[in-house]
Amino acid sequence: MDLTPLAAGLAIGLGALGPGIGLGLGVSKAMEALGRNPEAAGALFVPYVLGLALTEAVAIYALVIGLLILFT
Amino acid sequence: MPEETGGHSESLIHVAIKAETLFHIGPIAVTNSMVGSLIVFVLLASLAWWASRNHAVVPSRLQSLLEFPVEFLGGIVRGQHETRWRSILPPVLAIFIIVLFSNYVGLLPGVGTIGVHTVENGHDVVVPIIRPASADLNFTLALALIAFVLFVGWGIRANGVKGYLKETFVANPPYMTPLMTPIHIVSELSRIISLSMRLFGNVFAGEILLAVMLALTFAIVPVAFLGLEMIFGAVQALVFALLTLTYITLATAGHGGGHDEGAESHGHDADDVALRAGAH
C-alpha cells in the first residue's frame, strides 16, 4: 500500500491548521482595531497585509513540502 | 469506479512543478513559463510606450489606471522614506507591476488549457503552451535575488560598507557575536527562500486550484475561484513589493539601533540632502 498521498495530505492539512488559526487571530484583531479607531485604516493596512503574508507563508511551506512528497 | 475517476482526473489535471520545455533554440530550452513572461514583457512594454506618448494633464481612463499603482505605492514608500522615496520607489514599483501582470497571465482564458500533446512516462499529457511566469520557481527566485541585492545595496548605501558589515556580522554587545552572527546570516538568506517560495506557492497552488475546480465541477463554479485568484494575484504582488520595501527600510535604518541613534540619523540626514540634490 502506497502511503505517499496520505503523507502529502497530512503535510498540507496539518500544516494549514496553525496558519489558519493565526490568520483568524490576525484578522479579528485588525477588525477590532478598525472598529475602535476607523481613522487608523491607512496606517493599519501595510502592517496588516504584511502580517497576513508572513503568517500565510507557513502554510505555503507546508504546501511545498506536500508537493515535494507527492512528486519526488 | 475509483480507478476510472482517478484516471479521468489525471488526464484533466496536469500538475508539473517545473516549467516544461516546448522547444529548443540552440542550447537554450524555451519553456512555457518563458512564453508567459514574454507576454508580460510585451504587454508592459507596449503599455509603457503608450503611456509615455499619450500622457495628458487630465488623465484618460487608461492613464489613471496606470497612475493608480504609482500613486498608491508612492504614498506608502513616501510614508516610510520621506527623503529618499524617489530612488526607492522605482524598483519596488517595478517588482509590483511585473508580479501583478505575471500572476494575471495565469487567469487569461486558454492559459493552462491550450497545449501540445506529448508522451511523458508512457502517459499522453497536454503540455500547456503558456504558463504564468510566477508559477515557475526560476522566475520568483530571480525576483527574490533582485530584491536581496536591492536591500543589501541600500544597506551599504545608507550605512557604508563598513557600517553594513559591522551591523550584519557584529552583534550589539560584542560578546554575543558568535551566537548572533549565524542567526543573522541565516535570517538574511532565508528572506530569499521565503520571498520566492511564497509567490511560487501561491500562484502554483492557485493554478492547481483552478484546474481541480474545472475538473470536478461544471462550467460556472470555477468563475468564483477565478475572482478569488484575481484578489490573490494582486495581494501577492503587493506583498512581494511591500516585503521588499520593508527589508530596504530595515537595511537603511540599521538593525542594531540603540545608543548611537543620534549619530546615525545625523549621517542619514547628510546622505539624504545629497540624494535630494541629485534628484532635483
Image (spheres, coloured by chain):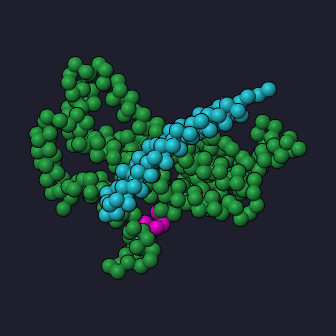
Which quadrant: the N terminus of chain B?
A: top right
Which quarter of the figure has residue B254? top left
> Up-down: is A67 above or below A28?
above
Between B203 and B97, the residue placed more toward the observer is: B203
Which quadrant: the C terminus of chain B?
A: bottom left
Tell which chain the image draws in cyan: A
Q: Outermost residue toward the right? A: B1
> Residue sitting at 80 percent across and 26 percent down?
A1
> Residue sitting at 43 percent across and 48 percent down?
A26
Q: Write down the region rendered in magenta.
A: B45-50
Viewed as shown, does residue B176 lie left or right of B34? left
> Residue sitting at 31 percent across and 57 percent down?
A43
Between B172 and B36, the residue placed more toward the observer is: B172
> Up-down: is B216 above or below B264?
below
Which quarter of the figure has residue B68? bottom left
Which quarter of the figure has residue B253? top left
Is residue B239 among the parts visible in the rendering? no
> Up-down: is B241 above or below A15?
below
Viewed as shown, does residue B19 lie left or right of B142? right
Magenta part mainly helix, strand or loop?
A: helix
> Residue sitting at 71 percent across and 65 percent down?
B220
Viewed as shown, does residue A58 lie left or right of B219? left
Q: Where in the figure is residue A58, as x and y percent of width and height?
A: 50, 39
Between B220 and B211, the residue placed more toward the observer is: B220
Q: Where in the figure is residue A51, as x and y percent of width and height?
A: 41, 47
Q: Where in the figure is residue B105, as x and y percent of width and height?
A: 57, 58
Q: Where in the figure is residue B37, as x and y percent of width and height?
A: 54, 53
Viewed as shown, does residue B238 lie left or right of B173? right
Q: Residue B48 lies in magenta, yes or no?
A: yes
Is residue B227 among the parts visible in the rendering? yes
Tell which chain the image draws in green: B
Q: Residue B140 lies in magenta, yes or no?
A: no
